[in-house]
Image (cartoon, rainbow, N blue to C red):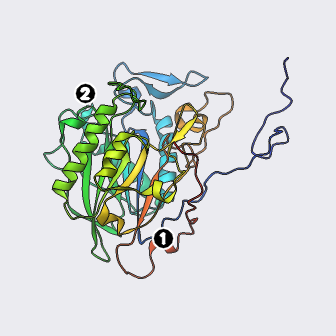
Amino acid sequence: MELPATGQVVGADSVNDPIVSEDDREYVVPEVGGNLQLGAFNVLNYFSDLGEDEPGCDAYTDIYEDPVAANWCEVRGAYDQDSFEDQQAKIVTAINKMDADVLGLQEIEANSALSYKDLPRDTAMAALVEALNEDAGRTRWAFVPSPVGQVPSNEDIIRTGFIYDPSTVQLLGSSQILLDDAFANARYPLAQKFKDVRTGKPFVAINNHFKSKGSGEDDGTGQGRANPSREEQARALTAWTEEMYEDEAVLLMGDFNAYSRETPVQIIEAAGYTNTAKTAEPASATYQFGGRLGSLDHIFANEEAMRLVTGAAVWDINGDESIAFQYSRRLYNVTDFYRDHEFASSDHDPTLVGLDTGNRGKGKGDDKGRDKPNPGKGKGGN
């Protein structure tokens, strides 16, 4: 039996939709308290280099055969300038709305790793910061420079990086890259020590992007491919952190490509770290795969850092969203779903944590108008 469509369903209150639903998009960034806020955000292959400039690079095209995204090239992001501007507009909106003091980014281009150009490693970081500050109308952001003489020669084309608000936090020393063979098939962790400029309180943030589940050995445990690699990476990371930053307040953040109950996360927790968002919002999730939701993105705090933590949350702007809203799927359908808002700016949700780094009067979190965290709210367990 065929039932012909009588009208297009648009929105939660469409007269053509017999199912009662509501718009539960999280329009306001969740409140995490504290006088500093830190976050982690996978920015879905933000490349300042374009596919059209790479020799032999093909494109994914829209219904009009116009190129949109690079198709299995060294460049993994936008194919041309128009698509890059679409992508960047969404990421800029999301980051500036987060209004964090320190933000760890994953899947941003390591420009120096391109085989056909000779560019500084931080080119994409600088381009994103410039766009963010232009949107903010002031010098709101700076990026943490790559450490001199420490960049691996076999680096992946995507990397981790930090941006921060220089009016609220200061860099203490240069960044450090964990050059351990455990990360040869992933991204090398990036560490940076910061200081609250108004209280002097230091803390360490280490940005991570573990090996993905898409390739490598399948150990038969149901945790995706390359789980032994992620376990080795978790051990190497926690051992290095203990050696380098003993007795420091340390936060491990990023895309660990491991769900909250998988063994790489258990290894990190066994080393004395608390999974902040899962503690604050047990049902929260950051990623959708095959219609199922779970958290691949985490911010872990050691015992010293947990003394500073005031709250943690996931900002639900991406994992729940249809890929039709992503820049790379623009005009894949006769309807143009693209908007330059924060929703579907990536395929991962950002994670946030608040820190109380000392008494300095009214904190940033007190006047942002954010929603207070609700431990009972979430997208479903994993």
Residue at 31% from the left image edge and 49% from the top image edge = 268
Give the crowd class for mark 2: few <14, some 14-19, many >=20 residues within 10 Å. few
Give the crowd class for mark 1: few <14, some 14-19, many >=20 residues within 10 Å. some
Locate residue 202, reporting x and y percent: 26, 68
Q: In this view, does 70 lie to the left or right of 24?
A: left
Q: Which image quarter is the N terminus in?
A: top right
Q: Nearer the viewer, residue 351 or 265?
A: 265
Locate residue 90, reporting x and y percent: 52, 46
Indicate whether 225 appears above or below 349. above
Residue at 30% from the left image edge and 32% from the top image edge = 228
Residue 321 visible, this orientation: yes
Q: Nearer the viewer, residue 256 or 45?
A: 256
Locate residue 40, reporting x and y percent: 40, 52
In the picture, the disc for residue 115 is 2
Residue at 80% from the left image edge and 46% from the top image edge = 13
Mark 2–mark 1 Cα distance, whole angstroms, equals 44 Å
Instruction: For the residues labelled 2 and 1, say whether their Cβ atoms are less than 8 Å apart.
Output: no
**Marks 2 and 1, the one that precedes in the sequence:** 2
Residue 50 in which image quadrant: top left
